[in-house]
Image: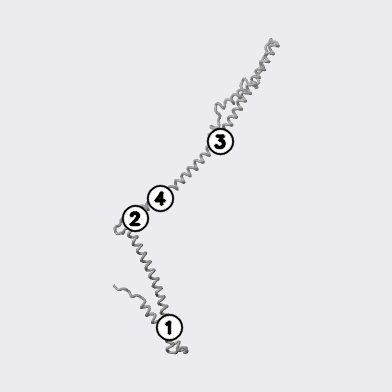
């Protein structure tokens, strides 16, 4: 194949054949005759001069023909070199285009694979959403469910009740603190009155016994007050 592609065309082979024929052919002046020509017996000087000029003209014409053949051969060389360079450039361009096409094809294949993955994920998401839609439709079409407006009103009512209970709890806490302070004040006044009545201010031991008894009384009073302040559970 390499020899076939490198061979010369007929139009390219002609200048080589012309030069070869011109230099090596039978009529070439470079070839020596096998034997010297026999001079004619009666030949004048004029005839010899005419013969010499004829040969000189033949040599001059042969030289011009040879120069023309070599000029044609040179142009053939230039043409072959130009075609060779042009073919190399074209082969390089084709190789570059081939690489670009292969890279583009690979990028398209990669993009197609990525798009296929995205399509599968989208199909899974769509299937899941359809299932959710079916469940949502079953829920919304259920007759046992109350309307949305009614549910919103119930939520608002429930939130209002929660706020009222929180406010009431704060009020109970404040009331309990006030009652506790009042009870502490009453207990302090009662202790003071007992000390004055019994006259035991200056007797430490009796005071300690008194304080122990008062603490027991305070505990019992606190329990009693706690039972009084705690509302009884509703029956029924």
Q: Crowding near pointer 4: few (<14 within 10 Å), some, many (20+)?
A: few
Label 3 and label 2: CA atoms lie apart by: 68 Å
Question: Which one is in front in this view, the residue at disc 1 or the one at disc 3?
Answer: 1
| Residue 189, disc | 1
The residue under the point 37% across, 79% down is 225
| Circle nearer the N terminus (1, 3) | 3
- The residue identified by callout 4 is 122
In the rendered view, tell whether residue 226 sits above or below residue 17: below
Question: Which one is in front in this view, the residue at disc 3 or the one at disc 2?
Answer: 2
| Residue 89, disc | 3
| Residue 136, disc | 2
Q: Secondary structure at mark 4?
A: helix
Looking at the image, how many numbered discs can be counted on the residues? Answer: 4
Q: Residue 109's spot in the image, x, y percent?
A: 46, 45
Q: Crowding near pointer 2: few (<14 within 10 Å), some, many (20+)?
A: few
| Circle nearer the N terminus (1, 4) | 4
Label 2 and label 1: CA atoms lie apart by: 70 Å
State yes or no: discs 1 and 3 in contact (Cβ < 8 Å).
no
Pick the front one: 24 or 221: 221
Label 4 and label 3: CA atoms lie apart by: 48 Å
């Amino acid at each position: 194949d390499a020899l076939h592609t490198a061979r010369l065309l007929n139009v390219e082979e002609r200048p080589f054949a012309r030069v070869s024929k011109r230099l090596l052919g039978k009529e070439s002046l470079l070839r020596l005759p096998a034997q010297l020509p026999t001079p004619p017996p009666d030949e004048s000087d004029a005839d010899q001069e005419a013969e010499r000029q004829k040969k000189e003209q033949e040599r001059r014409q042969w030289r011009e023909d040879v120069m023309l053949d070599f000029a044609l051969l040179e142009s053939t060389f230039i043409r072959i070199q130009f075609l060779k360079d042009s073919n190399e450039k074209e082969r390089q361009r084709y190789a570059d285009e081939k690489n670009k096409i292969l890279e583009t094809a690979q990028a398209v294949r990669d993009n197609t694979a990525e798009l296929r993955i995205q399509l599968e994920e989208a199909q899974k998401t769509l299937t899941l959403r359809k299932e959710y839609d079916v469940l949502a439709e079953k829920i919304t079409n259920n007759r046992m469910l109350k309307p949305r407006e009614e549910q919103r009103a119930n939520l608002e009512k429930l939130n209002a009740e929660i706020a009222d209970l929180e406010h009431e709890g704060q009020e109970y806490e404040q009331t309990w603190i006030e009652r506790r302070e009042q009870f502490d004040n009453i207990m302090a006044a009662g202790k003071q009155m007992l000390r004055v009545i019994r006259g035991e201010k200056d007797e430490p031991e009796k005071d300690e016994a008194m304080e122990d008894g008062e603490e027991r009384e305070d505990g019992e009073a606190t329990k009693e007050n706690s039972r009084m302040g705690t509302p009884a559970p509703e029956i029924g």
